[in-house]
Image (tube, rainbow, N blue to C red):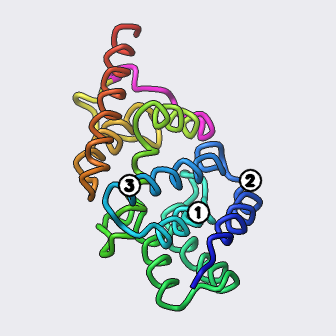
Amino acid sequence: MTRPDNYKKLKEYVRKKVERNDPAHDFEHIMRVYNNAKRLARMERVEPRLVLAAALLHDLVSYPKSDPRSKNSSTESASKARKVLTAHGYAKKEMNTISDAIRDHSFSRGVVPKTQTGKILQDADRLDAIGAIGIARTFSVGGAEKREIYNTEDPFCRIHNLDDGKWTLDHFYKKLLLLEKRMSTKSARLEAKRRTKVMKQFLDDLKEEI
Protein backbone atom coordinates (compact mmCIF):
# COMPACT_ATOMS: atom_id res chain seq x y z
CA MET A 1 0.00 0.00 0.00
CA THR A 2 1.40 3.37 -1.02
CA ARG A 3 1.61 5.96 1.72
CA PRO A 4 0.11 9.44 1.12
CA ASP A 5 3.50 11.09 1.70
CA ASN A 6 4.75 9.46 -1.48
CA TYR A 7 2.87 12.14 -3.44
CA LYS A 8 5.23 14.71 -2.00
CA LYS A 9 8.20 12.56 -2.98
CA LEU A 10 6.79 11.97 -6.45
CA LYS A 11 6.17 15.69 -6.92
CA GLU A 12 9.75 16.55 -6.01
CA TYR A 13 11.08 13.86 -8.34
CA VAL A 14 8.90 15.04 -11.22
CA ARG A 15 9.71 18.72 -10.64
CA LYS A 16 13.40 17.98 -11.23
CA LYS A 17 12.75 15.55 -14.08
CA VAL A 18 10.69 17.96 -16.21
CA GLU A 19 12.67 21.15 -15.55
CA ARG A 20 13.93 21.13 -19.17
CA ASN A 21 10.49 20.57 -20.68
CA ASP A 22 9.02 23.35 -22.82
CA PRO A 23 6.63 25.79 -21.05
CA ALA A 24 3.56 23.94 -22.35
CA HIS A 25 4.68 20.69 -20.72
CA ASP A 26 6.46 21.98 -17.61
CA PHE A 27 5.80 21.26 -13.93
CA GLU A 28 2.93 23.75 -13.85
CA HIS A 29 1.22 21.73 -16.59
CA ILE A 30 1.79 18.57 -14.55
CA MET A 31 0.17 20.16 -11.51
CA ARG A 32 -2.81 21.48 -13.47
CA VAL A 33 -3.42 17.97 -14.80
CA TYR A 34 -2.95 16.63 -11.26
CA ASN A 35 -5.56 19.05 -9.91
CA ASN A 36 -7.92 18.31 -12.81
CA ALA A 37 -7.55 14.59 -12.10
CA LYS A 38 -8.21 15.08 -8.39
CA ARG A 39 -11.39 17.03 -9.15
CA LEU A 40 -12.63 14.54 -11.77
CA ALA A 41 -11.94 11.56 -9.50
CA ARG A 42 -13.97 13.20 -6.74
CA MET A 43 -16.87 14.04 -9.05
CA GLU A 44 -16.85 10.60 -10.67
CA ARG A 45 -16.47 8.92 -7.27
CA VAL A 46 -13.29 7.13 -8.25
CA GLU A 47 -10.54 6.32 -5.73
CA PRO A 48 -7.91 8.92 -6.65
CA ARG A 49 -4.67 7.29 -5.52
CA LEU A 50 -3.61 5.68 -8.80
CA VAL A 51 -4.86 8.42 -11.11
CA LEU A 52 -2.97 11.08 -9.13
CA ALA A 53 0.26 9.11 -9.46
CA ALA A 54 -0.44 8.74 -13.19
CA ALA A 55 -1.04 12.49 -13.52
CA LEU A 56 2.29 13.27 -11.87
CA LEU A 57 4.22 10.89 -14.12
CA HIS A 58 2.39 11.28 -17.44
CA ASP A 59 4.94 13.61 -19.08
CA LEU A 60 8.24 12.23 -17.83
CA VAL A 61 9.30 12.16 -21.49
CA SER A 62 8.19 15.06 -23.67
CA TYR A 63 9.79 15.52 -27.08
CA PRO A 64 9.23 18.72 -29.09
CA LYS A 65 6.25 18.37 -31.43
CA SER A 66 8.51 18.69 -34.47
CA ASP A 67 10.66 15.77 -33.26
CA PRO A 68 9.80 12.47 -34.98
CA ARG A 69 10.00 10.82 -31.56
CA SER A 70 7.12 12.95 -30.28
CA LYS A 71 4.56 10.19 -30.91
CA ASN A 72 6.55 7.95 -28.57
CA SER A 73 6.45 10.36 -25.63
CA SER A 74 3.59 8.64 -23.79
CA THR A 75 5.00 5.15 -24.35
CA GLU A 76 8.42 6.17 -23.06
CA SER A 77 6.83 8.02 -20.14
CA ALA A 78 4.92 4.86 -19.23
CA SER A 79 8.12 2.83 -19.29
CA LYS A 80 10.00 5.32 -17.10
CA ALA A 81 7.04 5.55 -14.75
CA ARG A 82 7.33 1.84 -13.97
CA LYS A 83 10.86 2.32 -12.67
CA VAL A 84 9.81 5.30 -10.56
CA LEU A 85 6.80 3.47 -9.15
CA THR A 86 8.92 0.46 -8.23
CA ALA A 87 11.22 2.74 -6.25
CA HIS A 88 8.21 4.25 -4.47
CA GLY A 89 6.74 0.95 -3.37
CA TYR A 90 3.83 0.46 -5.75
CA ALA A 91 2.56 -3.08 -6.31
CA LYS A 92 2.82 -4.70 -9.74
CA LYS A 93 -0.94 -4.48 -10.38
CA GLU A 94 -0.90 -0.80 -9.48
CA MET A 95 2.07 -0.16 -11.76
CA ASN A 96 0.27 -1.87 -14.63
CA THR A 97 -2.81 0.31 -14.18
CA ILE A 98 -0.80 3.52 -13.94
CA SER A 99 1.59 2.79 -16.80
CA ASP A 100 -1.25 1.70 -19.10
CA ALA A 101 -3.07 4.94 -18.30
CA ILE A 102 0.03 6.99 -19.14
CA ARG A 103 0.65 5.08 -22.36
CA ASP A 104 -2.93 5.49 -23.59
CA HIS A 105 -3.65 9.09 -22.56
CA SER A 106 -1.99 10.61 -25.62
CA PHE A 107 -4.25 12.11 -28.31
CA SER A 108 -1.98 10.78 -31.05
CA ARG A 109 -2.53 7.17 -29.93
CA GLY A 110 -6.19 7.55 -30.78
CA VAL A 111 -7.48 5.16 -28.11
CA VAL A 112 -9.95 5.34 -25.25
CA PRO A 113 -8.31 3.94 -22.09
CA LYS A 114 -9.88 0.79 -20.68
CA THR A 115 -9.77 1.76 -17.01
CA GLN A 116 -11.34 4.62 -15.09
CA THR A 117 -7.83 5.62 -14.05
CA GLY A 118 -6.88 5.95 -17.70
CA LYS A 119 -10.05 7.76 -18.70
CA ILE A 120 -9.70 10.33 -15.93
CA LEU A 121 -6.02 10.92 -16.72
CA GLN A 122 -6.81 11.39 -20.41
CA ASP A 123 -9.69 13.77 -19.64
CA ALA A 124 -7.61 15.72 -17.12
CA ASP A 125 -4.80 16.18 -19.64
CA ARG A 126 -7.19 17.15 -22.42
CA LEU A 127 -8.85 19.77 -20.25
CA ASP A 128 -5.48 21.49 -19.93
CA ALA A 129 -5.30 21.62 -23.74
CA ILE A 130 -8.44 23.74 -24.07
CA GLY A 131 -9.93 26.93 -22.68
CA ALA A 132 -7.81 29.96 -21.79
CA ILE A 133 -4.85 27.88 -20.69
CA GLY A 134 -5.14 25.81 -23.85
CA ILE A 135 -4.91 28.94 -25.97
CA ALA A 136 -1.79 30.03 -24.09
CA ARG A 137 -0.16 26.61 -24.40
CA THR A 138 -0.99 26.32 -28.10
CA PHE A 139 0.71 29.58 -28.99
CA SER A 140 3.62 28.78 -26.69
CA VAL A 141 4.27 25.61 -28.70
CA GLY A 142 3.67 27.40 -31.98
CA GLY A 143 6.21 30.06 -31.11
CA ALA A 144 8.79 27.54 -29.98
CA GLU A 145 8.34 25.65 -33.24
CA LYS A 146 8.52 28.91 -35.25
CA ARG A 147 5.17 28.28 -36.90
CA GLU A 148 3.19 31.02 -38.59
CA ILE A 149 0.20 32.10 -36.52
CA TYR A 150 -2.30 31.48 -39.32
CA ASN A 151 -2.69 30.91 -43.03
CA THR A 152 -3.12 34.42 -44.42
CA GLU A 153 -5.26 33.18 -47.32
CA ASP A 154 -7.60 31.19 -45.08
CA PRO A 155 -7.01 31.97 -41.38
CA PHE A 156 -10.00 30.06 -40.05
CA CYS A 157 -9.52 26.88 -42.04
CA ARG A 158 -12.56 26.94 -44.30
CA ILE A 159 -10.97 25.52 -47.44
CA HIS A 160 -7.31 24.57 -47.02
CA ASN A 161 -6.00 21.23 -45.80
CA LEU A 162 -5.22 21.51 -42.10
CA ASP A 163 -1.53 21.68 -41.25
CA ASP A 164 -0.88 22.55 -37.60
CA GLY A 165 2.81 21.89 -38.13
CA LYS A 166 2.88 25.06 -40.24
CA TRP A 167 0.05 27.24 -38.89
CA THR A 168 -0.74 27.39 -35.18
CA LEU A 169 -4.38 28.37 -35.65
CA ASP A 170 -4.97 25.16 -37.59
CA HIS A 171 -4.43 23.26 -34.32
CA PHE A 172 -7.74 24.57 -33.02
CA TYR A 173 -9.60 22.96 -35.92
CA LYS A 174 -7.49 19.83 -36.13
CA LYS A 175 -7.65 18.96 -32.43
CA LEU A 176 -8.73 21.45 -29.77
CA LEU A 177 -12.30 22.08 -30.90
CA LEU A 178 -12.83 18.31 -31.17
CA LEU A 179 -11.89 17.46 -27.61
CA GLU A 180 -15.20 18.41 -26.00
CA LYS A 181 -16.90 15.42 -27.61
CA ARG A 182 -14.00 13.07 -26.91
CA MET A 183 -14.09 13.27 -23.14
CA SER A 184 -14.89 9.99 -21.41
CA THR A 185 -16.38 11.25 -18.16
CA LYS A 186 -19.50 13.34 -17.65
CA SER A 187 -17.66 15.74 -15.36
CA ALA A 188 -14.97 16.40 -17.97
CA ARG A 189 -17.56 16.91 -20.72
CA LEU A 190 -19.26 19.63 -18.68
CA GLU A 191 -15.99 21.47 -18.06
CA ALA A 192 -14.88 20.96 -21.66
CA LYS A 193 -18.08 22.58 -22.88
CA ARG A 194 -17.27 25.72 -20.89
CA ARG A 195 -13.67 25.81 -22.05
CA THR A 196 -14.66 25.28 -25.68
CA LYS A 197 -16.88 28.35 -25.49
CA VAL A 198 -13.82 30.32 -24.36
CA MET A 199 -11.88 29.16 -27.43
CA LYS A 200 -14.73 29.90 -29.81
CA GLN A 201 -15.07 33.39 -28.38
CA PHE A 202 -11.32 33.89 -28.84
CA LEU A 203 -11.60 32.84 -32.49
CA ASP A 204 -14.52 35.22 -33.02
CA ASP A 205 -12.56 38.07 -31.44
CA LEU A 206 -9.49 37.23 -33.50
CA LYS A 207 -11.59 37.26 -36.66
CA GLU A 208 -12.70 40.80 -35.85
CA GLU A 209 -9.12 41.93 -35.32
CA ILE A 210 -7.49 40.46 -38.43
Give x and y (percent) for residue 175: 34, 45
Element class at badge 2? loop
Rendered residue at 53%/32% (across/down):
136
Amino acid type for the residue under numbered disc 3: Leu
Which residue position is annotated with label 1? Answer: 56
What span is colored magenta in the figure? 143-155
As drawn, the residue found furthest toward the bottom would be: 92
Which residue carries the number 3 mark? 40
Residue 108 falls in which quadrant of the image? bottom left
Q: Nearer the viewer, residue 66 or 176?
A: 176
**Disc number placed over residue 20 in the picture, else none:** 2
| Marked residue nearer the N-terminal end (1 or 3) | 3
Q: Nearer the viewer, mark 2 or mark 1?
A: 1
Q: Nearer the viewer, residue 5 or 205?
A: 5
Residue 205 part of the magenta segment:
no
Where is residue 39 drawn, in percent x and y? 42, 52
Secondary structure under the numbered disc 3 in the rendered image: helix
The image quadrant of residue 68 is bottom right
Drawn side of residue 182 relative to residue 20, left or right = left
Element under disc 1: helix
Could you tell me which residue is drawn at 40 percent across and 46 percent down?
A: 127
Cα separation, mark 3 vs mark 2, equals: 28 Å
Residue 93, how many percent across, how many down?
A: 47, 89
Look at label 2 and name its amino acid.
Answer: Arg
Eye-nearest disc, 1 or 3? 3
- Spatial separation of the CA atoms under disc 2 and disc 1: 16 Å
106, 35: nearer the viewer: 35
In this view, 121 is above or below 126: below
Q: CA distance from mark 1 to mark 3?
A: 15 Å
- Residue at (54%, 64%) from the top-left corner? 58
Q: Amino acid at mark 1?
A: Leu
Picture quarter with the N terminus: bottom right
